[in-house]
Amino acid sequence: MWITHSYLGTTRGGMRCLFFLLFEDYIDAQRGLSDEVKTELERFARNLGDSGALVAPFPGDAPTTQLNVLDKHWTEEERDELRNTPAMLMIDTDFDDFDPRSHSWILFHFDRSFVDRTYAAKLRSLLANIVSETSNQDHDPFEVVRDAMRNEAVARASKVLKLEPGVFGVSIDLRAGWTSLKEYLRSRNTQNKEREDDSA
């Protein structure tokens, strides 16, 4: 996990995706996530390996990094979603070059009221699927979410903010949407394995 005072200047290098933790302020950064969820995010950061990086602010710099993100070319509806923290923004370009009008992005919302181990275990499963899709060079992790949005159960639990050729933004409430998204990803992985077995 990268800890920084500003998201400006964060580059992707050879990685496929960057994941930015978003907090409204110092208190949000300190108390917005349970210890169990923080542990799962640390595991997620480690498991991403060379495929991606999880970037977080120093607690005192949470307002600065939040402004770094809000200063992008968002619609008002999208800004409202970004203010709903804690959250994690996924992009596939350098931060300074990122433009939500022309680059893919996904916003994952964490539920601060869910602090038990059951939620943490479910979150672990979902984050493991994200790692799998990000690290697989044959898969486009954004296309996976686009496909998932065509699933009625996932779409109901999520909020598609932008969906048109070349531009994609989606906000997912992990409390409401994690079960549907996880089940979708599991069935998708099963179908991919069956296809690989048939072609072998």
Image (spheres, rainbow, N blue to C red):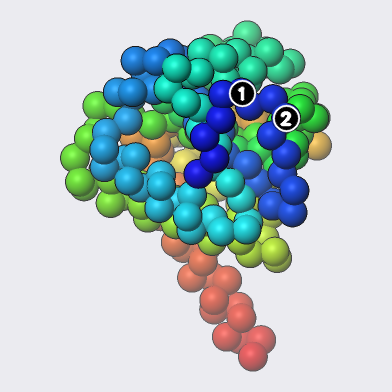
Which residue does the numbered mark 2 point to in the structure image?
A: 9
**Amino acid type assigned to the residue bearing label 1 in the image:** Ser
The structure residue drawn at horizontal position 50% and vertical position 44%, both measured from the top left corner, is: 1
Q: Is residue 136 above or below residue 194?
A: above
- Residue 82 occupies quadrant: top right
Q: Identify the element where label 1 is drawn.
A: loop
Residue 16 location (% of width, % of height): 69, 51
Q: Can you see residue 94?
A: yes
Q: Residue at x 69, y 25 (%)?
A: 8
Residue where numbered disc 1 is placed = 6
Q: Is residue 149 above or below residue 83?
A: below
Give the image location of residue 84, x and y in percent: 45, 18
Task: Give the camera-side residue of 26 and 115.
Answer: 26
Question: Which quadrant holds the C terminus?
Answer: bottom right
Q: Quadrant of residue 193?
A: bottom right
Which percent across, then down, holds residue 167? 76, 33
On screen, residue 29 versus residue 122, left or right, reads right
